[in-house]
Amino acid sequence: MIDPTQNPVVLSAQGLIKRFGGITATNNVTLNLHHGARHALIGPNGAGKTTLINLLTGVLAPTEGRITLEGQDISNLPPHLRVRRGMVRTFQINQLFDSMTPRETLALVVSQQRGLGGKWWQALGADAAVNRRCDELLEQFHLTSVMHQTTNVMAYGKRRLLEIAIALACEPRVLLLDEPVAGVPAGEREELLQTVAALPADVSILLIEHDMDLVFSFANRMTVLVNGTVLTEGTPDEIASDPQVKEVYLGHGEGAQHHG
């Protein structure tokens, strides 16, 4: 198992605090994502995972603390500028363009990424580099067979694959994978899991996920969040055998033994 902590830190949250009125949703969280890491953020419902991701992506502003991306302070940058700097989150389904096909959607994203802006409809047929990149993404994410279907009629698993393809089309250096298998039927999961496992090694990934099988097969580093606070961090083996984690999260040892 690769130890990502030997690599430089690409995304760092230091002492993050987020208060909503009298409630502290994020309580002094420090998290370092190393280059090339497969880092999972886990914790029971209500642990504050979504709040933390919203802080990292700029949807929420921290009450205290700072966030740096490749050494630059991005604590106050709006979300779209964080994307431009290379930090991308997988978007939820309702943000996909329902009436567009995967081919059109990826052409739009790739064109914008390459500075072609609003001329994506011209690029759809005209720009060879955009077409090549779209073809690569469609193949990599098993979308070639549905590339001319509109998103709203695609199988749920394919839509999740398209979400990740869109994120990768933004050429991220840091990818926040937000519950990629949530709601995906069992029959469609394998393709998704294989695709996630095959994401480029130089992209540093923070995975937020409830599915422990995926977490333990994917992650080389794990952070456990409980009540907005970091309970512990370590390798999957360390987390699986940690008595505190078993107590609050893994069902008093059953989950840990299952993955041991």
Image (spheres, grey):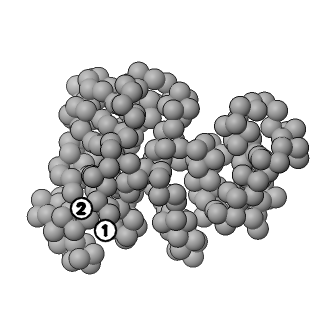
Q: Residue at x 27, y 52 (%)?
A: 5
Point out residue 184 in the picture as x, y percentages from the top left corner.
Answer: 54, 65
In this picture, residue 118 sits left or right of residue 88 = right
Is 240 placed above or below 83 here?
A: below
Question: Where does the image place residue 7, in percent across and percent down from the top left?
Answer: 32, 49
Check disc 1: other Cα within 10 Å, few if <14, some if 14-19, many if 20+.
Answer: few
Residue at the (48%, 39%) spot, across then down? 87
Residue at x 26% of width, y 23% of height: 64
Q: Distance between the residues labelled 2 and 1?
A: 9 Å
Contact flag, marks 2 and 1 (Cβ < 8 Å)? yes
Q: Mark 2 points at which residue?
A: 235
Q: Which mark is residue 103?
A: none
The mark found on residue 1 in the picture is: 1
Measured as percent of width and height from the top left, residue 246 is found at 17, 65
Crowd tier of the residue under label 2, counting other residues whose Cα lies within 10 Å: few below 14, some 14–19, many 20 or above: some
- The residue depicted at 88 percent of the width and 43 percent of the height is 126
* Amino acid marked by disc 2: Thr
- What amino acid type should be assigned to the residue bearing mark 1? Met
Q: In this view, does 111 lie to the left or right of 257?
A: right
Residue placed most toward the observer, 155 or 80: 80
**Quadrant (top left, top right, bottom left, bottom right) of the N terminus:** bottom left
- Return the disc, 2 or 1, that comes first in the chain's sequence: 1
